[in-house]
Amino acid sequence: QVQLVESGGGLVQTGGSLRLSCTASTRTFSSYLMGWFRQAPGKEREFVAQITWSGDGTSYADSVKGRFTISRDNAKNTVYLQMNTLQPEDTANYYCAARAQFRSIWGFWGQGTQVTVSS
């Protein structure tokens, strides 16, 4: 089992920045693909970004490309999401997720951290 704990959410004005962190309780953190998802009220959960095991490959949703950056520190069992130029439509609960190698589903999820962008 992998436990994921997010932090760093909060209230920010339009155009501001936040950095989310997600720390995993596993000795094999570097073997997991890590991702960030978000869910706004009344909407389905959507993909935001993901990063490969070594950190050399990333992908983003079109809505955040160029504004958000995902990174990881395997020595600290932590994945980050740097969010810049935040917009009100970025308001959501942000979830960290982990996917084991050779698996097609995101098997582990954090409890989420709320990000609110005021206009």
Image (cartoon, helix red, strand yellow):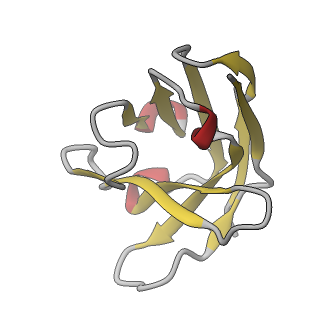
Q: Is residue 76 left or right of residue 64?
A: right
> Which residue is at the far front?
119
On screen, 109 above or below 27? Answer: below
In this view of the protein, which residue sits in the foreground, 61 or 32?
Answer: 61
On screen, 74 above or below 17? Answer: below
Q: Is residue 39 left or right of residue 32?
A: right
On screen, 91 above or below 101? Answer: above
In this view of the protein, which residue sits in the foreground, 20 or 34?
Answer: 20
Q: Say which residue appears at 51% left-offset and 16% top-offset.
A: 15
Q: Quadrant of the N terminus?
A: bottom right
x, y percentage for residue 118?
A: 72, 23
Q: Say which residue appears at 31% left-offset and 53% top-offset.
A: 62
On screen, 99 above or below 5? Answer: below
Q: Is residue 27 left or right of residue 3?
A: left
Q: Say which residue appears at 69% left-offset and 17% top-offset.
A: 12
**Quarter of the rendering containing residue 65:** top left
Q: Quadrant of the C terminus?
A: top right
In this view of the protein, which residue sits in the foreground, 79 or 65?
Answer: 65
> Which residue is at the far left?
56
In this view of the protein, which residue sits in the foreground, 99 or 63?
Answer: 63
Q: Say which residue appears at 50% left-offset and 82% top-offset.
A: 105
x, y percentage for residue 91?
A: 68, 40
Q: Total marks drawn? A: 0
